[in-house]
């Protein structure tokens, strides 16, 4: 448990609780030290979005849910920050779409792999791939530790869902013919631009909504699901996200930034 008391009345309560969760996960070897920097970067982009799921993202979430439901061998790739922030939702989503869960780390160590697998198991995961010898093969043309994958998981997946990823692996996965769904709050990142479907949102808001969409779309026939995926244009969507941020900043600048904060 965290040693810090955060008063629920604090105006930044939720954000502070998430920070504590990340710091706590660092203490348990789930999050890498560099994960704290990544989280700060995410917070910054969340400010720009107004800490909300913007409307165009609902279409990205819907398309992502459809793609996951159509997948034959879906895999959810999990790193330290993802496990710490939405480990429970990862397990729930995997159950909903019958996906495998695989640990894939940039700052890979056996200790961290096992800590993440243990956390996911505590949320009910039966099998966690990518730990120790299970990461038995590599993604070609990728030289970071992220290249190590399981021949039962990411290597043979048709659809890979990932979050807080680096552009190199997203690109390498695309080259391997995978359909990549990325959760990345930065619409300008290489991952966002490389993925087939990007969900530009904080992973803590995106995952529960993705689960909801999966539950809603489950009753649709495959032909309708395929139509939803086909109609989604990632490039256009990313432009809409950047335009949203630009418009919001101009409006804030014109109306006086302080007006948007409670007195
Ligand atoms: O656990 P490991 O060893 O695999 O390391 C994972 C980190 C996160 C340290 C590593 O992947 C990393 O350095 O990530 P980046 O490149 O700093 O962040 C990847 C992207 O995730 C950036 O575009 C961030 O803006 C974005 N991001 C950060 N926090 C969030 C986020 N996207 C969604 N939700 C967030 N909470």
Image (tube, rainbow, N blue to C red):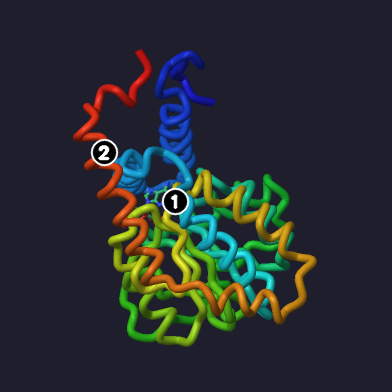
Residue underneath mark 1: 201
Secondary structure under badge 2?
A: helix
Which residue sits furthest right? Answer: 219
Q: Measuring 76% from the left and 70% from the top, which residue is drawn there?
A: 220
Q: Measuring 55% from the left and 54% from the top, which residue is drawn there?
A: 114
The vertical placement of 4 against 119, above or below, is above
Q: Residues within 10 Å of mark 2 (few under 14, many from 20)?
A: few
> Picture coordinates of residue 85 (x, y %)?
51, 44
Q: Residues within 10 Å of mark 1 (few under 14, many from 20)?
A: many
Rendered-image quadrant of the N terminus: top right
Confirm or reject: label 1 Cβ below 8 Å from ligand 1: yes
Given residues 164 and 195, the one toward you in this image is: 195
Give the spatial CA distance, label 2 vs label 1. Answer: 21 Å
Given residues 116 and 191, the one toward you in this image is: 191
Asked which quadrant contains residue 154, the reply is bottom right
Given residues 110 and 261, the one toward you in this image is: 261
**Which comes sooner in the sequence, label 2 or label 1?**
1
Q: Measuring 45% from the left and 48% from the top, which residue is drawn there?
A: 54
Rendered-image quadrant of the C terminus: top left
Does residue 125 appear in the picture of this structure?
yes
Q: Is residue 144 left or right of residue 55?
A: left
Ligand 1 shows up in which quadrant of the image? bottom left
Asked which quadrant contains residue 58, the reply is bottom right
Residue underneath mark 2: 251
Does residue 33 appear in the picture of this structure?
no
């Amino acid at each position: 448990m965290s040693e810090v008391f955060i008063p629920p009345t604090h105006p930044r309560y939720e954000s502070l609780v998430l920070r504590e969760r990340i710091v706590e996960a660092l203490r348990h070897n789930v999050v890498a030290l560099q994960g704290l920097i990544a989280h700060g970067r995410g917070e910054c982009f969340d400010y720009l979005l107004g800490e909300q799921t913007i409307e165009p993202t609902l279409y990205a979430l819907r398309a992502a849910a459809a793609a996951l439901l159509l997948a034959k061998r879906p895999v959810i790739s999990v790193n330290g920050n993802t496990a710490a922030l939405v480990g429970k939702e990862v397990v729930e989503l995997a159950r909903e779409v019958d996906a495998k869960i695989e640990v894939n780390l940039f700052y890979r160590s056996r200790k961290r792999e096992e800590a993440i697998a243990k956390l996911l198991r505590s949320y009910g995961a039966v099998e966690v791939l990518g730990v120790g010898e299970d990461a038995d093969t590599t993604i070609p043309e990728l030289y970071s530790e992220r290249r190590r994958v399981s021949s039962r998981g990411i290597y043979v997946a048709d659809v890979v869902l990932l979050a807080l990823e680096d552009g190199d692996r997203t690109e390498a996965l695309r080259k391997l013919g995978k359909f990549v769904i990325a959760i990345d709050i930065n619409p300008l990142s290489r991952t966002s631009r490389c993925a087939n479907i990007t969900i530009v949102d904080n992973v803590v808001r995106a995952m529960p909504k993705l689960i909801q969409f999966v539950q809603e779309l489950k009753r649709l026939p495959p032909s309708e699901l395929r139509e939803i995926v086909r109609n989604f244009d990632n490039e256009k969507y990313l432009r809409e996200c950047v335009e949203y941020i630009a418009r919001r900043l101009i409006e804030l600048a014109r109306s006086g930034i302080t007006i948007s904060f409670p007195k």
